[in-house]
Image (cartoon, helix red, strand yellow):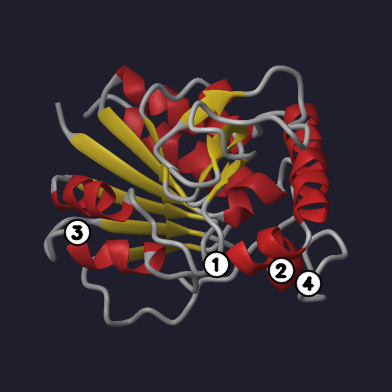
Amino acid sequence: MKKIVVLTGAGISAESGLRTFRDSDGLWEGHDVQQVATPEAWAANPQLVQDFYNMRRKDVLAAKPNAAHIALAKLEQQYDVTIITQNIDDLHERGGSSKVMHLHGIITRSQSSIDPALTYPIAGWGIKMGETCELGSHLRAHVVWFGEDVPMIAPAARICQQADIFILVGSSLAVYPAAGLVNYVHYNVPKYIIDPNIPDINRIKNLIRIAEKATIGVPEFVKQLLEPAR
């Protein structure tokens, strides 16, 4: 069974109504990212950061998987599929995908403030100040902040090396280290990028561009991949 590796970015979630910090105004839901998405922000005003992620979690739970999420899950009918996502929502899982790696964490879980390997499911949609992990530290959103290590990047790179087909959806390849994952895909593997605004990436070999938004381009491309060979 051929292995498909799909790297998804903010564009696929945006079509489910979830905004990101890379909106045109440079803010994330009205906040400077330095005030809500850094270890320094947590140290300076933990209540603001906690409240911010509680609201983002509420937004995620209210959102629904779109046609692109659902189409990617259908690929599992004929392929070994791994989704590597930069997104912190759970829309891929709710869309039906069974193997999803979250590079930047997932907002539906909490984590220890002193040991990011300690994560917990969240009861309801919020984390209250004063809730602690088993080591006694405050719980925070299970999200990789700016300035923190991305522990899943090495496993993701190994998965990309195994790809027979690589698909990039809804990413501008502007956020590192995630943007560097395409460099681990073997040069002769076909690489597809589906995005209405395809970045200038002529350095990548065997690249096929599909200039469509995710909810249009992904279902159409998945249909082609699932068509029986004639």
From the image, tell me which residue sits under label 3: 185
Query: Element under label 4?
Result: loop
Distance from the alpha carbon under mark 4 to that under mark 2: 4 Å
CB within 8 Å, label 2 to label 1: yes
Label 4: few (<14), some (14–19) or many (≥20) C-alpha neighbours in 10 Å:
few
Query: Which residue is drawn at the image coordinates 55% and 45% (left, top)?
Result: 113
Q: Residue 124, percent across and down?
A: 75, 19
Can you tell which of label 3 and label 4 is closer to the viewer? 4
Q: Residue 2, percent across and down?
A: 16, 33
Query: Element under label 1?
Result: loop
Residue 33: mark: 2
Residue 66: mark: none
Seen in the image, is 158 located left or right of residue 152? left
Distance from the alpha carbon under mark 3 to that under mark 4: 34 Å
Residue 32: mark: 4
Can you tell which of label 3 and label 1 is closer to the viewer? 1
Query: Which residue is drawn at the image coordinates 29% and 63% (left, top)?
Result: 182
Residue type at the position of mark 2:
Val
Residue type at the position of mark 4:
Asp
Query: Which residue is drawn at the image coordinates 33% and 18% (left, top)?
Result: 77
- Between discs 2 and 3, the one toward the N terminus: 2
CB within 8 Å, label 3 to label 4: no
From the image, tell me which residue sits under label 1: 146
- Between discs 3 and 1, the one toward the N terminus: 1
Distance from the alpha carbon under mark 1 to that under mark 4: 12 Å
For the residue pair 40 and 160, the one nearer the viewer reads as: 40
